[in-house]
Amino acid sequence: AQTVTQSQPEMSVQEAETVTLSCTYDTSENNYYLFWYKQPPSRQMILVIRQEAYKQQNATENRFSVNFQKAAKSFSLKISDSQLGDTAMYFCAFMTSGSARQLTFGSGTQLTVLP
Amino acid sequence: GAVVSQHPSRVICKSGTSVKIECRSLDFQATTMFWYRQFPKKSLMLMATSNEGSKATYEQGVEKDKFLINHASLTLSTLTVTSAHPEDSSFYICSTPNPGLARNEQFFGPGTRLTVL
């Protein structure tokens, strides 16, 4: 079974600054996918960024980037130039590469961007 | 635009009644849908996997007679909370992968807030 751990229940960052959210996971699989989802107050889950485990290059989406360390089973999210709209709960998630396509979520990090 | 819809978005019911929540895929055929439950400020917990044309697969600890799942078509899955009690009050979310995409992206519905009085 897979587990996903987010050790930071809450974080805050000043607007325009950079913040890093931590995520570690445990799996015996070699091929899998990792995701960061954002859940704003509306509760709608929004995909922020994804990473395929077989790719060594870290994924980047505009102001969002990840630091994927496969050997350490670490998958942190860096948000640059933080904006007020980034305030949300952020969930790290794991998916095996098999047909099941089930997501296993971490406990979440509530990020608050301060003006 | 949204690719997965849920109805209703909010529902308040009396204890002992049953509530049906619908999850629809709008742009593609969804052979698999996942149902999650989320308590305030907590993570999403997978309840069951709904498969079109076959019985749902429930996670350990989830009562299949309490949470009835039906996936009768390729675009609709329903979750019925039977004989609801206050402890069933929660936020219920469905998701489905788009089988046409190779990137394993899941699409989430907007969720349903259930309050049982």
Image (spheres, coloured by chain):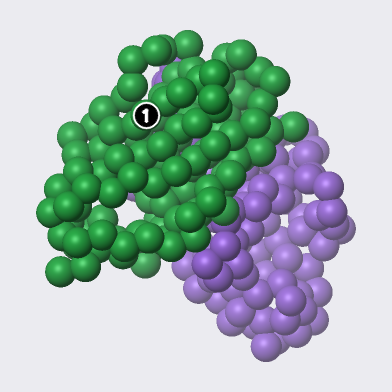
Chain colours: A green, B purple
Residue A82 visible? The answer is yes
State the residue in front, B69 or A29.
Answer: A29
Residue designated by label 1: A67
Q: Is residue B32 left or right of residue A63?
A: right
State the residue in front, B26 or A77.
Answer: A77
Q: Is residue B63 left or right of residue A59?
A: right
Q: Quadrant of the C terminus of chain B?
A: bottom right
State the residue in front, A33 or B82.
Answer: A33
Q: Quadrant of the N terminus of chain B?
A: top left
**Residue A97 in the image: above or below residue A35:** above
Q: Chain of mark 1?
A: A
Secondary element at tag 1: strand
Number of numbered tags placed on the structure image: 1
Q: Quadrant of residue B89?
A: bottom right
Q: Quadrant of residue A63?
A: top left
Q: Which residue is pictured at 33% across the width and 22% down the height?
A: A58
**Residue B67: x and y, percent?**
77, 58
Q: Quadrant of residue B40?
A: bottom right
**Residue B29: x and y, percent?**
50, 31
Q: Which residue is pictured at 84% across the width and 54% down the height?
A: B61
